Amino acid sequence: MNAPAHPGALPRRSTGDGVDLKFLGIYLNDHLAGATAGAERAARLARTARGSALGRALEPVAAEIAQDRTALIGIMRDLGVPVRRYKVCAGWTGEKLGRLKLNGCLVRRSPLGTVWDLEGLRLGVEGKTAGWQTLRRLSATAQGLDPAQLDTLLERARKQQETVEEWRVRQAEEALRTTTG
């Protein structure tokens, strides 16, 4: 065990393969909070767009994002990293609070709401991709990380990014264009 870096700091724990479990646990729980928010946002967006071309494009993405969250929990379990429920609750609550913004319509859903949801979803998928990349690099030396699983998760995240970005651009153009009449 290493000595604390500064007075009052908790001692750092290592897996024996050069990975600091304290900071890895914080990192993974922060990603789990983001994954919780992202899964909620993706599911809601797919639900509100159900029956449309956007809904048909996002339903499989939302399902994959939920699967990715489950995969993250499995990775945490394999590494012996406990899930911090308060961070999961913070991610869930943050997503709900993110809905409380004025988008130019008080009674019905604004077209900007879909744009904002897609932009938030894009940022979430980009963050998830960065997390998978970090874990993939650690897998070269860290026990408990499966490089093949992480490669699969990375590829899936990249495809999700492409789909979300395609629809974000479409929805932004539609919402922000003036109508002639």
Image (spheres, rainbow, N blue to C red):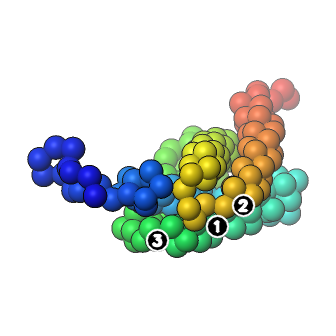
Q: Position of residue 175 (x, y in %)?
A: 73, 36
- Circle 3 — which element? loop
The disc, 1 or 2, on the residue closer to the chain's N-terminal end is 1
Q: Quadrant of residue 74?
A: bottom right
Q: Nearer the viewer, residue 90 or 133?
A: 133
Q: Which residue is mark 3?
A: 80
Q: Are marks 1 and 2 in contact (CB under 8 Å)?
A: yes
| Residue 110 position (above or below residue 74) | above
Q: CA distance from mark 3 to mark 1?
A: 14 Å
Amino acid found under the numbered disc labelled 1: Ala
Using residue 5 as the reference point, say whether residue 108 is left or right of it: right
SS at mark 2?
helix
Tell me the CA gap for discs 1 and 2. 9 Å
Residue highlighted by disc 2: 149
The local secondary structure at tag 1 comes to: helix
Left or right, 113 with respect to 173, comes to left
Q: Residues within 10 Å of mark 1 (few under 14, many from 20)?
A: some
Query: Which residue does the numbered mark 1 point to in the structure image?
Result: 71
